[in-house]
């Protein structure tokens, strides 16, 4: 472990950083949230890492994608504000450095990293501008690769037909693409590429819209418990009613029409590549 990292770790080890939501979700998280190698490969391809560069996974969770980058030869560390998530990451991947920290107060010097990734996490940042400003501070003219969803994409999820209040709350957490460009610009990032991503028929990482082609996934409480939209935003009454209606629609064949009515060519998720201005 690097000396500077040991110093930071000693300073931070006694400080509790808020991560209550994911401290709860983190219990059993890896049972359904396994890394998708195709997502990991695109993250690396878009990051364009240098062999000599240091990289950071922002809001790394249990470290699944951090480890994928590590295996692919990227010198990467992971930070998250959930102790439960990081305990799981350390247990699985002890050769990687893990640090508990808030994204708006990263304990690193200016221009320390050559690039960063952030997967399915920006919607949990209370202050997106402050988060991007801090990430910009620790990057040395590097790339920030974000994997997320936009509001417009989420409005095309057929989940809206069954869990409208829950999805509305979830959508409100996400920026639209114009807001994302604006906030990144204020943090000295320019968006250089966007790439839509469509949920495959056999997804590996079971995040929110992983059941796009397989609605039966949502009947599994373990799957739902590792998805923050269901575990944190869903009201029990709407969840029960929505699952009942979904079950009926699957059995009668009506679900096919519902799914078709939400078809979109805009992608289900998005890779966004931002470059820090020189």
Image (tube, grey):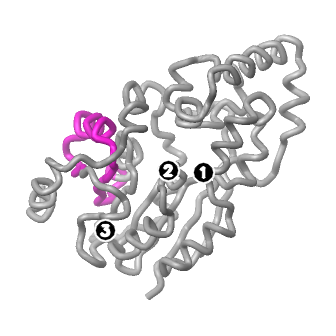
Q: For mark 1, what is the residue? A: 173
Q: For mark 2, what is the residue? A: 124
SS class of the residue under badge 1? helix
> Magenta segment, which residues?
70-98
The tag earlier along the polypeptide, 3 or 2, is 3
Which residue is at a point 75% across and 35% down the rendered structure image?
Answer: 164
Left or right, residue 82 beside residue 173: left
Which residue is at a point 39% across and 69% down the rendered structure image?
Answer: 135
90 falls in the magenta region: yes
Q: Is residue 265 above or below residue 210?
A: below
SS class of the residue under badge 2? helix
- The percent position of residue 109, horizontal first and vertical second, equals 23, 74
Which residue is at a point 62% across and 30% down the rendered structure image?
Answer: 234
- The percent position of residue 40, horizontal first and vertical second, equals 48, 49
- Is label 2 in contact with label 1 (beta carbons under 8 Å)? yes
- The percent position of residue 220, horizontal first and vertical second, equals 58, 17
Query: Callout 2: few (<14), some (14-19), or many (20+) C-alpha neighbours within 10 Å?
Result: some
- The percent position of residue 219, horizontal first and vertical second, equals 64, 17
Q: For mark 3, what is the residue? A: 51
Question: Residue 45 has which mark?
Answer: none
């Amino acid at each position: 472990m690097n000396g500077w990292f040991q110093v930071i770790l000693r300073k931070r080890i006694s400080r509790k950083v808020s991560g209550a939501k994911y401290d709860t979700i983190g219990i059993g998280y890896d049972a359904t949230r396994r890394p998708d190698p195709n997502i990991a490969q695109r993250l690396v391809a878009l990051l364009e890492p240098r062999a000599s560069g240091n990289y950071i996974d922002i809001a790394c969770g249990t470290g699944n994608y951090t480890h994928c980058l590590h295996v692919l030869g990227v010198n990467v560390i992971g930070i998250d504000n959930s102790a439960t998530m990081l305990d799981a990451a350390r247990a699985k991947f002890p050769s990687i450095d893990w640090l508990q920290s808030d994204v708006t107060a990263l304990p690193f010097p200016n221009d320390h990293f050559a690039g960063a990734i952030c997967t399915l996490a920006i919607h949990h940042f209370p202050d997106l501008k402050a988060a991007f400003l801090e990430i910009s501070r620790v990057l040395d003219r590097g790339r920030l690769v974000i994997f997320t969803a936009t509001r417009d994409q989420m409005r095309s999820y057929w989940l809206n037909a069954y869990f409208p209040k829950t999805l509305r709350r979830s959508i409100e957490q996400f920026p639209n693409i114009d807001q994302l460009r604006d906030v990144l610009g204020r943090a000295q990032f320019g968006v250089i590429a966007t790439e839509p991503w469509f949920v495959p028929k056999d997804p590996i990482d079971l995040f929110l819209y992983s059941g796009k082609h397989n609605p039966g996934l949502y009947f599994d409480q373990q799957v739902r418990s590792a998805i923050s939209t269901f575990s944190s935003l869903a009201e029990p009454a709407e969840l029960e009613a929505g699952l009942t209606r979904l079950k009926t629609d699957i059995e009668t064949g009506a679900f096919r029409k519902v799914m078709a009515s939400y078809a979109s060519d805009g992608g289900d998720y998005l890779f966004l590549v931002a470059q820090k201005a020189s």
